[in-house]
């Protein structure tokens, strides 16, 4: 009798555990959840790229200072040691395009079906 009760309880617990796991996985695979995960990954990647670019910029400034010292060049006093990344640039083609409008003329040919008879 106790053996049957034990296996019944073990089976019920396994069923509850499996159902819970499946429901969690299904919630993770909904379109809203997938979109949120993709957005979070994109934001995280953007932060990593920004940190990498700032590290590269700091390394460049440091190396320029080392080369300046080695070559005997003096840096200007008003030049900042740490600089931020430059802001986004607009395309040169967009700024240089003149505001002209092109007009096209098309020759229209009228066709009257009644002239064929």
Image (cartoon, rainbow, N blue to C red):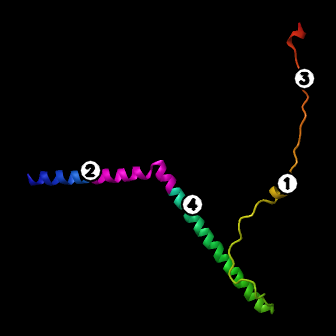
Where residue 46 appears, as percent x and y from the top left, is 60, 65
Element type at marker 2? helix
Between marks 4 and 3, how big is the CA–CA gap? Answer: 56 Å
Between the C-alphas of marks 2 and 1, the distance is 68 Å
Q: Which residue is mark 2?
A: 15
Q: Dot 1: what SS? A: loop
Q: Which mark is residue 42?
A: 4
Q: CA distance from mark 2 to mark 4?
A: 37 Å
Question: Where 54 falls versus 37 (above or below)?
Answer: below
Q: Are marks 4 and 1 in contact (CB under 8 Å)?
A: no
Q: Which mark is residue 97?
A: 1
Q: Earlier in the sequence, mark 2 or mark 4?
A: 2
Q: Which residues are magenta?
A: 16-36
Q: Secondary structure at mark 3?
A: loop
Q: Position of residue 77 (x, y in %)?
A: 76, 88
Task: Say whether disc 2 or disc 3 marks the residue closer to the N-terminus.
Answer: 2
Q: Which residue is mark 3?
A: 109
Q: Is residue 27 magenta?
A: yes
The residue positioned 62% from the left and 70% from the top of the image is 50
Q: Nearer the viewer, residue 5 or 30?
A: 30
**Precedes in sequence: disc 4 or disc 1:** 4
Relative to the observer, which residue lies in front, 84 or 47? 84
- Give the CA separation, mark 2 to mark 3: 78 Å
* Residue 108 point in image, percent of width and height: 89, 26
Q: Which residue shows up at 90% across the image and 10% down it?
A: 115
**Rendered image quadrant of residue 60:** bottom right
Q: What is the chief secondary structure element of the magenta stretch?
A: helix
Identify the residue at image location x=81%, y=60%.
92
């Amino acid at each position: 009798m106790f053996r049957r009760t034990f296996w019944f309880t073990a089976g019920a617990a396994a069923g509850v555990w499996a159902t819970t796991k499946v429901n969690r996985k299904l919630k993770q695979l909904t379109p809203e959840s997938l979109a949120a995960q993709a957005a979070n990954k994109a934001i995280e990647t953007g932060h990593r790229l920004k940190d990498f670019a700032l590290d590269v910029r700091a390394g460049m400034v440091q190396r320029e200072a080392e080369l300046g010292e080695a070559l005997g060049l003096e840096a200007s006093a008003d030049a900042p040691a740490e600089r931020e990344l430059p802001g986004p640039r607009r395309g040169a083609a967009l700024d240089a395009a003149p505001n002209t409008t092109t007009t096209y003329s098309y020759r229209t040919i009228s066709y009257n079906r009644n002239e064929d008879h």
